[in-house]
Amino acid sequence: MRFLLALMLALAAAAAQAASLRTSTTLHSQYVYLRDLFDDPGRNADRLLGPGPGPGERIIVEAAQLNAIARQYDVAWRSLSSGDRAILEWPGQPLSIDAVAGAVRDTLAATGDRSDYDIDLPDFAAPMVPSGASPGLLVSQLEFDRSNGRFAALLTVTADGMKPMALRIGGRAEAMIEAPVSAGRLKQDAIVRAEDLRMGRVAAASPERDVARSMDQIVGMQLVRPIGPGQKLLLSDLTRPVLVRKGALAQAELSAGSLSIAGQVMAVDSGGAGEVVRVQNVTSHLFLFARVTGLGRVRVTPDGPGAFQTIPARFEDKVTSR
């Protein structure tokens, strides 16, 4: 009886001291320790076994290797079946491309270049970093060709628990400026209002040299083509609102000294306020130049081009004395 009791106590003590397999472990660094594979592994719990998976990766340790590790480090554990295994995983996330672009932008600024750059990294393959980490980014060996905006550099990435990694990056840095862009879709011939615009970032070295830079250049102007949301506006996209349309009748006025002559003409050109257009007298069919003064209204002035040479002798309308 005493023998059975002693045997039971010995078995209980052995069970209490035995290690148990950790079938799934979340790592927090790139190294694997004995304690990551077993609970209660004994005096070698803090023994470094070697490198583990990278951020966002996992490794699987099968029964045969687990048995070999347990024997080597005196762990009181043996597999019960060949299906025993331990999964070691280090959660990760892709390095933010926006963070990389910001690091390149900061490095350009550190050279004394204060331009607001838009950084494009078309071939960048984001490496994995530990989940929740705030990686440190260092851009060095920067080569920047300002004539075409191309750059190349060495990017060094550091994070807690991870070995520093270095990779070559390259792309394009385009200087940007603040300029008005469309707040929504604008139709052709629309008169642009202040609420149709917002300020946005556009390329400073745009191929279209006539980018409108201020609201004052745009508001009140008429569009010659449709504009999509968020698009910059070119001066060539704008014209003064058409007040006199080609082929339409308009009221014409000639002021000379104390006389004012009013009559009806047909517009040969379309024009906005203040623009000079050609018109034709509907009676004599003679042509003259006139300045647009309002909706359907033009004025011929004595100093206007061709004013006296083309004014008809019989301008059938009314003559008033001032």
Image (cartoon, helix red, strand yellow):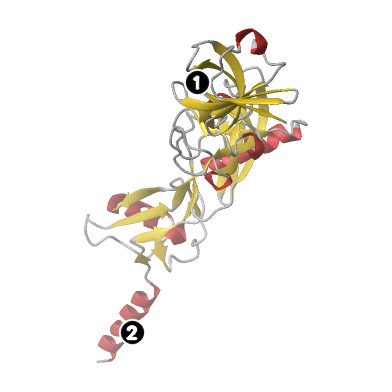
Res. 319 image quadrant = top right
Q: Nearer the viewer, residue 43 or 304?
A: 304
Mark 1 nearby-residue class (10 Å; few <14, some 14–19, many ≥20): many
193 left or right, relative to 18 = right
Q: Can residue 164 be seen in this view?
A: no
Q: Which residue is drawn at 21% across and 59% down?
A: 81
Q: Nearer the viewer, residue 284 or 192?
A: 284
Residue topped by disc 2 = 9
Q: Where is residue 244 in the image (x, y as percent from the top left)?
A: 51, 27
Q: Nearer the viewer, residue 255 or 52?
A: 255
Q: Which amino acid does label 2 sit on?
A: Leu
Q: In which quarter of the image is residue 19?
A: bottom left
Amino acid tagged 1 = Ala
Looking at the image, which residue is at 46% across and 40% down?
Answer: 229
What residue is shown with label 1? 267
* Label 1, label 2: how far apart the Cα atoms are: 116 Å
Spot occupied by residue 115 in the image (x, y as percentages of width and height): 70, 32
* Residue sitting at x 67%, y 20%: 146
